[in-house]
Amino acid sequence: MSGAPVDALLAQLERVKQTGPGQWRARCPAHESEGLTLSIGEADSGAALLHCFAGCGAADLLAALGMQLSNLYPPDELIKARRYDTRPRRDLRATLHQISYSSTVVEVAAEQINAGKALSSEDLRELRAACHTIREAAL
Ligand SMILES: [Zn+2]
């Protein structure tokens, strides 16, 4: 099985330094410099990301590496094997707000039941929607 595109890319670069999770800096192969001007990243989709802060274009970078644009993207079998997340990124803050609101609905319903009051059909619908929202947030 072939490795991730970013691994193949890093193997070809000099003075690679990891700067964070899925992020590296290295010497740019497309221009003369000892500085670590090349930024390398791995997208959630598994694609390798390249950027030279000295201004080298993507085509120059790929030519210097002897790579093609398609080399930066994971092959289909790797996407399946690694379960790369190809869904759009979810807004975490918005999700937390939804969970917060939903938990309030659940709390109010619980207090109403505890007080011996029956839930109206509208309250029940709201409660079901809130439970659905909380479950969906975990997916
Ligand atoms: Zn460069």
Image (cartoon, rainbow, N blue to C red):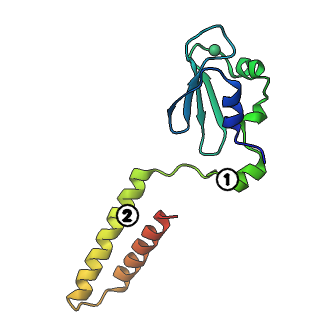
Apparent side of residue 95 relative to residue 63 in the rendered image (left or right): left
Q: At 24% from the left edge and 84% from the top edge, which residue is drawn?
A: 112
* Element assignment for label 2: helix
Q: Which residue is mark 2?
A: 99
Instruction: Name which residue type carries label 1.
Output: Arg
Residue that label 1 marks: 82
Classify residue 134 by image quadrant.
bottom left
Q: Locate residue 115, reporting x and y percent.
A: 20, 88
Which is more N-terminal, label 2 or label 1? Answer: 1
In this rendering, would 11 be left or right of 121?
A: right
**Residue 19, percent from left and from top:** 49, 30
Q: Residue at position x 28%, y 90% from top?
A: 118
Label 1 packing within 10 angstroms: few (<14), some (14-19), many (20+)? few
| Marker count (numbered) | 2
x then y, percent, for residue 13: 67, 23
The disc placed on residue 115 is none
**Label 1 element class:** helix
